[in-house]
């Protein structure tokens, strides 16, 4: 059977969505660059081992992988962090800190859902070389800045620390890494299960009722650094010293950057079971949906897996499609500025050459300009200009060409003016 | 064995190359948009049948293809034309002509060579709905315009017509499509073989010595439309009528667009054995290398393969990597404007907060700004600013913070000035 449909979970990006994406990507990119990050594009296809090294062989079920014609096991990238970390780990030319970003697609073999595809885009920024919470604070600031740059002012960031959480779990009596992991897994599901189920999961990991109570009292705590410091120190003084120092530095930096009112320390943030080992954070649309817009954190061991250069690191990534949904709901795209687009209509074959040379001049002045590509009557040309969303029609007839004055019609208002070409160019060219 | 190297033929795009690509892509994109083309992004992964439908099953040897977890045969796209044609063939919402472009990567399982990878980028523009040579002329104009926009003024376009060439081959006595194809294949290799070998290939296809002479006399002809018209009519009057009419319209349009001096009709241009069925063209760097920079032509049957909407079409594509090579040789990238990048250095911990709030203001004014992410001495900070290519350093010390006057050093000239923050912002912000 011949299939010209799209593979399951795949899609084309059509004209309208692409215009929005171009606008969005340009806003994101300009903002990230203000922090000195530089763009890279890691390979789309990696050795399968490279992908497994970050996430274990369980990742096989979730990604596209295949053998090439030489029998090599390859896979399509499932995030941008792997490639960027691998690049940095093998490159000694960059002076530290190394701040890189990418905005690009990746693939996962998930079950497709409404608005969720097997190919999706992320903006991603990674900072290598600093173990200070300075760098984590910059990631939070960058993320909030990106949201503001695209028109989302109502975003809050919840911040936690993996080692602080781990310290509390251990202080409650966890004996093994597996026990810590089980509690992480349970807490990571907290939003998706009832409190009863959550308690059940933690008990199954080997904790008593009062330990569960203590743990939940801490993880339910949200607020300023000082508030969270108080409660965590009361539970686990010994384990919390270094992570609390990190969070304190972060909180100071956020103060200096004027961002404290949009941030809270929130011990319920776990960020999965992955490779994070320090400060973690997640950004949410404050009003209504509580949609997660970005997330990130510190991962100090990943580069040492991939190359000779072991570097502390912190990063953030956000989904482009998810961001577009939020912007769509807020009507941000409807405010996108649309530049002039001119259709140069020809009244008669003998003026075609004149119409083309006028079009060349309009384009030289930066105005998007088209002329008829079919042998159309003037009436058909004007219908087309209407249907195809042009902002202006310039009519070139024999009389106009001779007089050097042309009829310019603004399609939205219907206003017509007769102008010289110089006047037309002055009026239509971008500022 | 764990492999953290890149798969054969794959690569990462590093900071320096990416900066050039961003500049280049922005120039290409801005220019294509002046012609009213709109960007799309076809799916990266297609059903294998979709890819085979354009190029036959021989394409299997040249592309990445695999089965997904549900046993479907999928393949990575090897060009942008397939996806764009499939999109258009199944979408009835666009008013014709439909003018779309993409700038994006694709994959082929070629043998990697110096500067040639298994993943590469093309800029690609396609125009659907007009069977007039108006549309082909626009493609030539667009392509030359793109070259000029990126700094290549010395590019010439060679133009031919597949049906004109086919007409001549048939008028010389070709009895079958296979014979026509054999001659196409021979002519397409003309640059890679000796004249003797070329003659041999044509003879093998079933032609006599004097027929070969006539054929080569025509295909070696290059020049204005009138010159080529004369020689082709003298050989094959009956077959040449319609194709010559196309070329005449094209030549007229190129005249109106002021591009004739950069174009020639050149019957040696074949553009492979693919799906082209009308005007074809190829653009070359005129001086020295004769590097092919873009190529395209008319393909009136492809959309009818892919969907319900059969539309005449013409398109062009050019390799981004190849273009970068040409620009690198001409030194175009060295003229790329580099925006200001400021490092805000802190003299002492007590001014860090002040330095951060100054950084926030610089960024709000559109200036890329960084501050130390490590606990560095002032001296170490200044060394870093030098090594990392900043244009300016702003030094914030206790005295400066109190006086509200800061030391701004331009790193290239070494010139230092003491200014208020307002003066600094005015001086550094982009125009």
Image (cartoon, coloured by chain):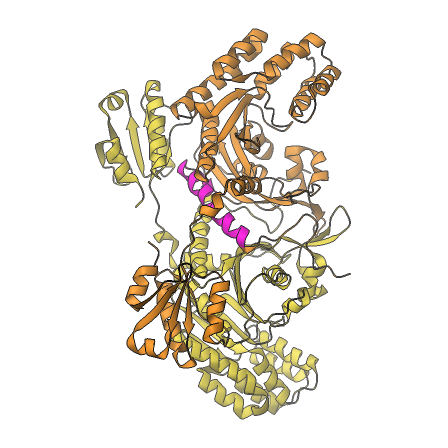
Chain colours: A orange, B yellow
Q: Position of residue A299 (x, y in %)?
A: 56, 28
B45 in the magenta segment: no
Q: Position of residue B282 (x, y in %)?
A: 50, 70
Residue nearest the observer in this picture, A227 or B192:
A227
Q: State left or right for residue A24 relative to residue B355.
A: right
Residue nearest the observer in this picture, B157 or A32:
A32
Residue nearest the observer in this picture, B429 or B35:
B35
Disc tally is 0
Q: Position of residue A123 (x, y in %)?
A: 52, 40
A23 in the magenta segment: yes
Q: Quadrant of residue B275?
A: bottom right
Q: Which quarter of the rendering shows the N terminus of chain B? A: top right
Q: State left or right for residue B178 relative to residue A410.
A: right
Whether residue B196 is visible, yes or no, is: no
- Residue at 44 percent of width and 70 percent of height: A371
Q: Quadrant of residue A165?
A: top right
Residue bounds of the magenta highlight: A16-39
Does residue B50 sit above or below B276 in this rendering?
Answer: above
Q: Position of residue B398 (x, y in %)?
A: 27, 20
Whether residue A219 is visible, yes or no, is: yes
Does residue A315 sit above or below A205 in this rendering?
Answer: below
Q: State left or right for residue A395 relative to residue A18.
A: left
Q: Quadrant of residue B259?
A: bottom left
Q: State left or right for residue B25 relative to residue B60.
A: left
| Residue sitting at the far front | A414
Does residue A97 sit above or below B220 in this rendering?
Answer: above
Give the prevailing secondary structure in the magenta stretch: helix
């Amino acid at each position: 059977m011949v299939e010209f449909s799209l593979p399951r979970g795949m899609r084309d990006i059509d004209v309208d969505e692409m215009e929005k994406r171009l606008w969005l990507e340009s806003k994101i990119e300009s903002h990230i660059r203000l922090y000195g990050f530089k763009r890279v594009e890691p390979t789309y296809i990696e050795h399968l081992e490279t992908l497994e090294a970050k996430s274990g062989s369980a990742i096989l079920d979730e990604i596209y992988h295949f053998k090439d014609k030489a029998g090599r096991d390859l896979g399509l990238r499932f995030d941008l962090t792997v490639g960027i970390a691998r690049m940095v780990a093998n490159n000694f030319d960059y002076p530290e800190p190394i701040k890189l970003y990418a905005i690009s697609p990746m693939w996962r073999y998930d079950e497709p859902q409404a608005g969720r595809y097997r190919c999706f885009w992320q903006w991603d920024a990674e900072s290598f070389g600093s173990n200070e919470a300075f760098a984590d604070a910059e990631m939070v600031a960058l993320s909030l800045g990106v949201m503001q740059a695209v028109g989302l002012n109502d975003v809050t960031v919840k911040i936690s620390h993996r080692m602080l959480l781990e310290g509390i779990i251990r202080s409650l009596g966890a004996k093994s890494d597996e026990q810590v992991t089980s509690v992480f897994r349970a807490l990571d599901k907290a939003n998706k299960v009832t409190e009863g189920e959550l308690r059940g999961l933690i008990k199954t990991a080997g904790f008593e009722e009062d330990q569960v109570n203590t743990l939940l009292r801490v993880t339910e705590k949200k607020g300023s650094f000082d508030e969270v410091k108080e409660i965590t120190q009361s539970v686990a003084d010994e384990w919390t010293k270094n992570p609390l120092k990190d969070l304190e530095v972060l909180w100071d930096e956020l103060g200096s950057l004027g961002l404290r009112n949009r941030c809270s320390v929130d011990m319920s943030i776990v960020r999965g079971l992955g490779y994070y080992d320090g400060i973690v954070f997640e950004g949410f649309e404050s009003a209504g949906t509580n949609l997660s817009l970005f997330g990130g954190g510190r991962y100090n061991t990943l580069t040492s897996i991939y190359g000779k250069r072991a570097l502390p690191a912190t990063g953030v990534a956000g989904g482009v499609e998810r961001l577009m949904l939020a912007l769509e709901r807020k009507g941000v795209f409807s405010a996108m500025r649309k530049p002039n687009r001119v259709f140069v209509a020809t009244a008669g074959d003998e003026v075609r050459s004149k119409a083309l040379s006028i079009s060349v001049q309009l384009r030289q002045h930066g105005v998007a300009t088209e002329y008829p590509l079919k042998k159309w009557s003037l009436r058909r040309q004007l219908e087309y200009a209407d249907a195809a969303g042009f902002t202006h029609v310039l009519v070139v007839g024999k009389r106009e060409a001779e007089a050097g004055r042309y009829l310019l019609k603004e399609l939205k208002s219907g206003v017509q003016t007769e102008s010289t070409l110089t006047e037309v160019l002055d009026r239509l060219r971008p500022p």
